Image (cartoon, rainbow, N blue to C red):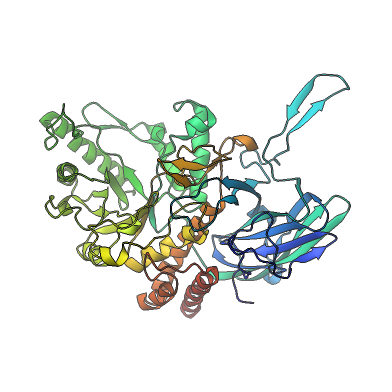
Amino acid sequence: MKNGIQFAALVLLLIANSPTHAAEENGIRLAVLGSMERIAQHQEVSGPQQAEICAAKNEWESFQVVVAAGPENVYVTQAEISDLVGPGGAKIGRDHIQLYREEYVRVRRSSPRAELVPGLYPDPLVPFVNPATGEPIEPRRRVSERWGGPVTVQGHDMFGLPFEVFRGQNQPIWVDVYVPKDAQAGRYEGTFRVAARGGISAVIPVTLTVWDFELPDGPTHKNHFGSFRNIARYFDVQRDSDEFKNIEMRYCRAMAEHRLNPPIPHHLLPEVNNDGSLKILPEQHEALKEFIAELHVTDFEISRAPFGRLRVSATEPDYKHIAPADREKAMRYYRDYYDYVKQNGWADRAYVYLWDEPNLPENYEQVLVLGELVHEAVPELKCLVVEQTYPHDPSWPDIDPALDIWCPLWAFIDRKTVGEKIAGGDEVWSYTALVQRAPRYHPEYERVKGLDPPYWHIDRPPIVYRVPTWINRQYGITGLLYWTTITTVLDAWNNPAFAHPGHFNGGGYLFYPGVPCGIAGPVSCIRLKNLRDGMEDYEYFVLAEKASDDEAVQTSVDKVAPEWWSYSKDPERLLAARQELAEKIVRAKAKSD
């Protein structure tokens, strides 16, 4: 069996009457799936009888165990994993392993150009243990101290254990394994065990190979995933309350755990005086330093100056000029802010999110005015604009002088102009939102007009969340942007679709609110785990390039992601390419040691 999780393809569209290869004991059948797989509730179970995964140090790696009932219902009371024991008795303790029950959510209407049919999909990952309290999440029950006495309700609607699997049905469990930085390289072994009422149980072996290299703490691949302001409505709290701040911090930690830069909470940032200067409060500053260090924040977004905003409207037609007083304040704001981040060692990846999708000629004019202001104030400060690397219309102004970071939609990406911007000293990020195909003004429109990039929705294979960093590497793109992870959906747990006016299942929605689990914070999902794995894959590109050369890395990337419209949907191919990169890194490290 190859390194990495080995598994049979279990795609929702391929429900077949294949023979069962799952481990079965006393009416419980167990099968292992990889992190890029999903299984339907009634799907025939077929998969390896053991879990085999590989990871570097300071990396998360995942697999799934499907608990399937035979001819009788199974009431599972316990699911646990042992310590993983490695070379010379070294251990990766179970405290480094997290277990989740996968909840099924309904796709009622398909997303535009969906690849998979409507139905129930496993996506939210309900933890066995409340991360805020460290205690198991108890199921909801009615309790009375005496017969006929007052009744109280305890527990919660969503929980990890126990759970019942009806005959012929499946319940997958997600297993997240973290490899500590100080782990010894080598092979680790353990077991995963499920027990049910009636004294029945089933066990499968688990093997982890730890590669002899370490991933960095923070993300190398730059990224921006929106703010957390919308969580207030999910938890019914005020945005300026201490309760909101505590919940927001839990969301920020969850982002960092998935190798994404959390948005810096507004209350940690310097206050802005009326003259544009910053007011640095010592206690606030220390809290910000602690936040950045603890969560390994690598990118620092400087908000646009709150002075001299340009607008296009009938009442404010002069959108090209900023009043001298406002201009002076804005200049002072940018200078003070850049000095502040530079003094604290945060300037290398600082940027201003200047404009989002300038889709009018007037917007192009505004981008030029605002970019000129930023660069006049601080020439070193980079400006990001969510726009493609070619003009919307050749008759519109050239906004190149205002931009340092271009951020086109995936379907809008053009390899030639991306390369030109990078060769000219600019950066290019990429982003996705909803379901857009290439525009008519794309330089290769006739070739790409009917092609689809890996849109992000529940009713698509999970690999679409992992592969974008591979495609970014193919184009020399160094950042990833997503509009939000907590948009307003129709029903947070029952119909998590963004309606705009179409139906986008899971679009802009990567965190489920933990309210039904009794968690004052987020619940992650399978899609977010795959995004994290893609961010970790990018670290392999960087380390392998340092260890060998760019051509060797390119060979591996070519096998998975030739371009945005022809990426591989085969999980085994991606894992094999990842292993190639790991082997290059390990060989180079062994030579240097």
Residue at position x 26%, y 54% from top? 405
Image quadrant holding the N terminus, namely bottom right
- Residue 277 lies left or right of residue 455; in this view the side is left
Depth check, front residue: 527 or 232: 527
Residue 419 in picture, x, y percent from top left: 25, 66
- Residue 10 lies left or right of residue 138; in this view the side is left
- Residue 119 lies left or right of residue 156; in this view the side is left
Q: Is residue 5 something one can see in this rendering?
A: yes
Residue 326, above or below 55: above
In this figure, what is the number of numbered marks? 0
Residue 260, above or below 1: above
Depth check, front residue: 240 or 415: 415
Residue 136 in picture, x, y percent from top left: 71, 42
Residue 215, above or below 304: below
Residue at position x 60%, y 68% from top? 9
Q: Is residue 216 something one can see in this rendering?
A: no
Depth check, front residue: 390 or 166: 166
Residue 70 in picture, x, y percent from top left: 80, 58
Residue 238 in picture, x, y percent from top left: 47, 25
User: Which residue is the extreme one toward the top?
Assistant: 149
